[in-house]
Amino acid sequence: MHDLVIRGGTVVDGTGAPARTADVAIDDDRITVVGRVPERGRAEVEADGALVTPGWVDIHTHYDGQVTWDDDPCPSAEHGVTTVVMGNCGVGFAPCPPDRRDWLVGLMEGVEDIPGSALHEGISWEWETFPEYLDALDRRQWTIDVGTQVAHGAVRAYAMGDRGAHNEAATPADIESMSAVVTEAIRAGALGFSTSRTMAHVAIDGEPVPGTFAAEDELFGIGAALSRAGTGVFELAPMGSAGEDIVAPRKEVDWMRRLAAATRRPVTFALLQVDAAPDLWRELCDISAEACAEGAPLHPQVAGRPTGLLAGLHTTYGLLDSIPTYAPIAALPPAKRVAALRDPGVRASILGWEPDEETRAALHASYERFFLLGDPVDYEPGPDATLAAVAARQGRDPLEVAYDAFLADGGDGLLYLPILNYSEGTSEPTREMLMHPAAVLGLGDGGAHVGFICDGSTPTWMLTHWARDRSRGDGLPLELVVQRQTRDTARLYGLGDRGVLAPGLVAEINVIDHDNLRLHTPVAAYDLPAGGRRMLQGVDGYLATVKSGVVTREGGARTGATPGRLLRGARPAPAA
């Protein structure tokens, strides 16, 4: 008798092989059979008509603080993610001497839009060094497995003090010290090192992330630590990745290519389509493919949908924010804010506002870029869904349409503003990126930008949009969609013990009603420590999620089990 049998499902095993009907048997935390299983299980999941896939491996998250107080890192955990990698983009919480705690909180709050009050109240600070941070995480357990990288911002401040925090140039002694810190972290179990060089990433005080202007000797000196260890990924948000500079990306990919060649360690960098150079991504992808062919593992990290802002009554950014008569309403508690906006007098005072010509022009330009998010949500909206188009069809002012959209669903209505990966109003470039042989899927930012983005739900969107629903162009094969967020992401980080449904591998599994898989509209929840706000996005259709052989979610609800643990270092696939 097996511990658990998932019976009769359509198995999409993560390798890209065609889907097939099979049973999956699990004993302890490992898969033991994929095929016909005549023996019974102590527990069984009936999967006839459902997909059976590996659990999703999400390599770009920011749960660095959240995992110290929360045993169910959402939104990722409710969307079938069973393994996350955090510590991305050069921000993290270790190493950290006591007098740097407030500063690191401010850095994370500014870069990743995680409320500082929540971080201050939630983090217990049981560490100073990076190995001590891992030891603190090792004492916890979750619904998912958690791996982390050591972040440049923390390393620079730890090794260089204020000079590092303020982006002063590193001396040879500084570089040696940082390399030693990174070596210590990798040997303790860090999955890699991360840095940020984009001017879009700034601390709460407006200062760029430490490392933004790091010279090549510093970057290569730190990269050498990964080379010496023979493990670890070098992850970064490069200059120009947010579209702030269209010359820098070519220079960035040049040194990244040389770094990957010199260290023979994977280098993965954020890559998105930017409006100022909408075809640049293709050139950078092709350069990366050439590097890989030469033995330099350089991998663009791409997104599954546009990176866009959610705008509503409970988000960080809202279309009404510039209207003076809205300011006192915005200061009200959430429920009172919604009630006030339903008052006819308040409505008239806001919609009757007369902006100056410059503001009017800016607003009218935004009406062409904001979309109604819709229900079901649509992250590839057509031009007929813009505020301007909807208002024209209805013979109304766009601001009035936005006002009513915000009040929909009890005041939870949202607009959507794509800012990256949507230069031409189509996701065709995203599709091409997802199919590119050098690219890896990431950039979901689970746990971050909690006031205006909820892209931790991207794994579900991959299945609903790309493998089922896309109407404005071709979709993607289901088998490729599954492979992209299981085997491929796991392999990049050396996690060969997961990401595929095969005997001997960790039993991380989703059972999915693909026909009825549906994303909910994101909603604001005030459930972070200190009452902090975050956007969450529910989902229907995950029948069961299994982590290390234990069912953690059934019918969309938690079972209470927390089999997830800290991942220390790369994990090779078991011998056949």
Image (cartoon, grey):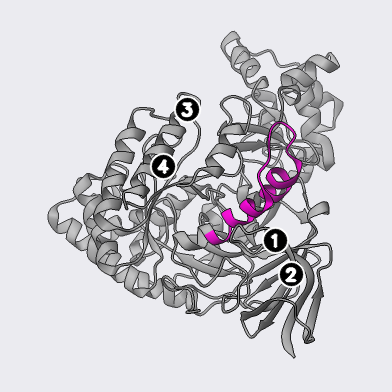
Residues at marks 4 and 2, CA–CA distance in whole angstroms: 37 Å
Which of the two labelled residues, at mark 3 and mark 1, occupies the earlier sequence position? 1
Region in magenta: 461-487
Q: Nearer the viewer, mark 3 or mark 1?
A: 3
Question: Residue at point 41% right, 33% down?
Answer: 283
Residue 438, compared with residue 49, is above or below; it is above
Q: Badge 1 local density, few (<14 within 10 Å), some, or many (20+)?
A: many
Q: Which mark is on residue 279? A: 3
In-front residue for pair 395/267: 267
Label annotation for residue 553: 2
Which three-letter amino acid code belongs to the residue tagged 1?
A: Glu
Looking at the image, tell me whether mark 2 or mark 3 is earlier in sequence order: 3
Query: Would you name the residue on which mark 4 appears?
Result: 202
485 magenta-colored = yes
Rendered location of residue 395, percent (x, y): 84, 13
Q: CA distance from mark 3 to mark 1?
A: 35 Å
- Element type at marker 1? helix
Circle 3 crowding by C-alpha within 10 Å: few under 14, some 14–19, many from 20: few
Tag 3–tag 4 contact (CB < 8 Å):
no
